Image: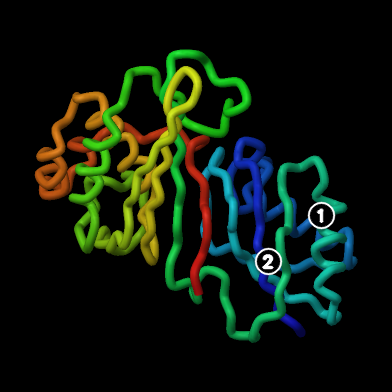
């Protein structure tokens, strides 16, 4: 039975998250139902990252086993036909070895977080970025992010319901850039690690926003890490600014 690797893009606002849930729409369910409609078989689609409700993906990866050998173009075109107007697109399909696993074979993940820093309400970017009105100091945000690089106990930056057996993670990159736009600034953060804790990126971004506003100092970040207390860090940034950008293997 051939195994296929799928690269998937989706708009998270339409879903309760990646993982199938009872009575709530999920990306996993949408793809599995499209496979059933196209190939008349039920199968499990395994994703590399279980994104939360409202979180988008530019390069989510999934794998699926199909009983017939199927041309790659038919997988993409056929599934996209059944997924049309649902906010999900199959960008690429590849044949992979039978021991490939979208989640457990991954060696790295990159998330992107987008902030639109302006007073005017969002129009084109509504539900696609975090709308922040107070001016943010991006240089201070980057200096604070640098303290999070490397291997740390990230208890202060994970959701209380996080099920990871260890709060220790290693951040390989945390790069914040910005572009001046009419009426404000578009700020983008790229965060890379082998794996992340639940809500880790969103809590880190909520904390860096406070640094950018001047409500926290850059020098506060190491002590927040050391407290190992979720109450010491900033709020959880909203999901609509977060994108699962890519998975490395």
Residue lying at 36% horizontally and 62% vertically, measured from the top left = 193
Q: Where is residue 228 in the image (x, y as percent from the top left)?
A: 16, 48
Residue lying at 61% horizontally and 21% vertically, measured from the top left = 123
Residue lying at 35% horizontally and 60% vertically, measured from the top left = 164
From what the image shows, is residue 189 above or below residue 28? above
Q: Position of residue 239 (x, y in %)?
A: 48, 37
* Mark 2 lies on residue: 6
From what the image shows, is residue 3 above or below residue 24? below
Quadrant in the rendering for residue 115: top left
Instruction: Choose between 68 and 41: the one closer to the eye.
Output: 68
Q: Distance between the residues labelled 1 and 2?
A: 12 Å
Left of 199 or right of it: where is 20?
Answer: right
The quadrant of the picture occupied by the N terminus is: bottom right
Q: Where is residue 124 in the image (x, y as percent from the top left)?
A: 62, 26
* Mark 1 lies on residue: 80
Left of 158 or right of it: where is 53?
Answer: right
């Amino acid at each position: 039975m051939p195994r296929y690797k799928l690269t998937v893009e989706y708009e998270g606002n339409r879903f309760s998250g990646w993982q199938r849930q009872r009575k709530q729409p999920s990306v996993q369910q949408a793809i599995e139902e499209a496979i059933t409609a196209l190939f008349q078989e039920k199968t499990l689609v395994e994703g590399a990252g279980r994104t939360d409700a409202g979180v988008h993906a530019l390069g989510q990866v999934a794998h699926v086993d199909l009983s017939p050998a199927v041309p790659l173009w038919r997988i993409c075109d056929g599934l996209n036909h059944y997924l049309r107007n649902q906010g999900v697109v199959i960008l690429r399909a590849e044949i992979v070895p039978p021991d490939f696993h979208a989640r457990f074979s991954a060696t790295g993940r990159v998330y992107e977080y987008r902030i639109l820093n302006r007073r005017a309400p969002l129009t084109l970017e509504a539900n696609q970025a975090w709308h922040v009105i107070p001016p943010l100091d991006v240089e201070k945000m980057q200096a604070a992010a640098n303290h999070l690089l490397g291997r740390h106990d990230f208890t202060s930056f994970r959701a209380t319901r996080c099920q990871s057996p260890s709060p220790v993670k290693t951040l390989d990159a945390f790069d914040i850039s910005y572009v001046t736009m009419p009426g404000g600034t578009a700020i983008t953060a790229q965060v890379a690690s082998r794996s992340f804790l639940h809500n880790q990126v969103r809590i880190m971004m909520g904390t860096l926003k406070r640094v950018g506003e001047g409500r926290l100092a850059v020098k506060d970040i190491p002590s927040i890490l050391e407290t190992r207390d979720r109450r010491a860090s900033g709020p959880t940034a909203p999901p609509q600014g977060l994108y699962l950008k890519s998975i490395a293997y």
